[in-house]
Image (cartoon, rainbow, N blue to C red):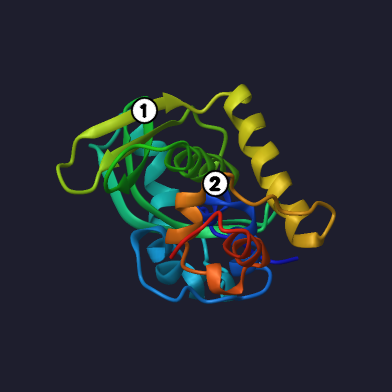
């Protein structure tokens, strides 16, 4: 089974066909842009399985119980054997009664940013135990928290539905749907390999 990264949610939400072209067919973007930066940064992660951070596993219950002061981990490598998802959490904060998973993102908050943070929270729970978890999206430039929530059963179910849909596209059980937003088509870094883009261009719907 193909390992995916939480950053793959970006391309999946942008366009299911784009996600398929990048993850299944290995098509490389023709230009560098923020949409693909996460994929570029994490592309080597799929070839590795990281060991659990021993220091964090030892200090987590102590920090959570308040026996030691707040613990902060940056760029924590995590993976889910069950979901076959691998990546790095930007920041984990652990203090008395609180475990906070933080994703740093530039620009406007999006649903894909929220889902990435929630997915990291779910992976953290799988690796480190059934603690109550709060997830947040932080502005990469200002450091301001743009969104936060608790990792609940309802939110976990939503994540699993999204990952399930992504898996079905990768296995061929479902056909990927192209975006209906033609502006996205023009900006897409892999449109040169997309049959839907070519058809729309031939029909005069898109002008480059």
Quadrant housing the N terminus: bottom right
Q: Is residue 82 above or below residue 114?
A: below
Q: Nearer the viewer, residue 69 or 19?
A: 19
In the image: residue 86, left or right of residue 149: right
Q: Secondary structure at mark 1?
A: strand
Is disc 2 placed on a helix, strand or loop?
Answer: helix
- Which residue is the site of mark 1? 148
Label 1 to label 2: alpha-carbon separation: 20 Å
Write down the residue under mark 2.
13
Q: Position of residue 131 (x, y in %)?
A: 51, 31
Residue located 80% across and 61% down the image: 171
Q: Nearer the viewer, mark 1 or mark 2?
A: 2
* The disc label shown at residue 194, or none: none
Question: Which is more toward the observer, 184 or 102?
Answer: 184
Q: Residue furthest left?
A: 142
Give the side of residue 57 with respect to residue 75, left or right: right
User: 10 Å neighbourhood of mark 1: few (<14), some, or many (≥20)?
Assistant: some
Q: Is residue 187 visible?
A: yes
Extreme residue toward the right, this view: 173
Q: Position of residue 125 (x, y in %)?
A: 55, 40
Residue drawn at (31%, 51%), measured in percent from left and top?
73
Outermost residue, front direction? 204
- Which of marks 2 and 1 precedes in the sequence? 2
User: Does the rendering let one see residue 53?
Assistant: no
In the picture shown, does residue 47 fall above or below 65? below
């Amino acid at each position: 089974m193909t390992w995916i990264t939480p950053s793959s949610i970006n391309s999946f939400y942008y366009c299911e066909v784009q996600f398929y072209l990048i993850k299944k067919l290995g098509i490389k973007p023709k230009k560098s842009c923020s949409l693909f930066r996460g994929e570029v940064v994490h592309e080597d992660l799929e070839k590795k399985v990281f060991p659990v951070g021993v220091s964090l596993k030892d200090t987590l219950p102590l920090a959570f119980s308040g026996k030691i002061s707040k613990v902060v981990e940056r760029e924590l490598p995590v993976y889910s054997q069950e979901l076959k998802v691998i990546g790095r959490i930007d920041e984990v904060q652990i203090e008395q009664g609180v475990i906070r998973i933080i994703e740093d993102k530039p620009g406007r908050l999006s649903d894909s940013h929220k889902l990435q943070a929630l997915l990291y929270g779910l992976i953290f729970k799988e690796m480190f135990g059934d603690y109550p978890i709060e997830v947040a999206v932080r502005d990469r430039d200002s450091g301001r928290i743009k969104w936060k929530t608790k990792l609940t059963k309802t939110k976990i179910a939503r994540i699993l539905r999204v990952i399930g849909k992504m898996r079905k596209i990768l296995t061929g059980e479902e056909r990927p749907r192209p975006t209906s937003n033609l502006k996205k088509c023009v900006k897409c870094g892999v449109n040169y390999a997309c049959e839907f883009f070519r058809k729309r261009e031939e029909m005069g719907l898109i002008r480059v």
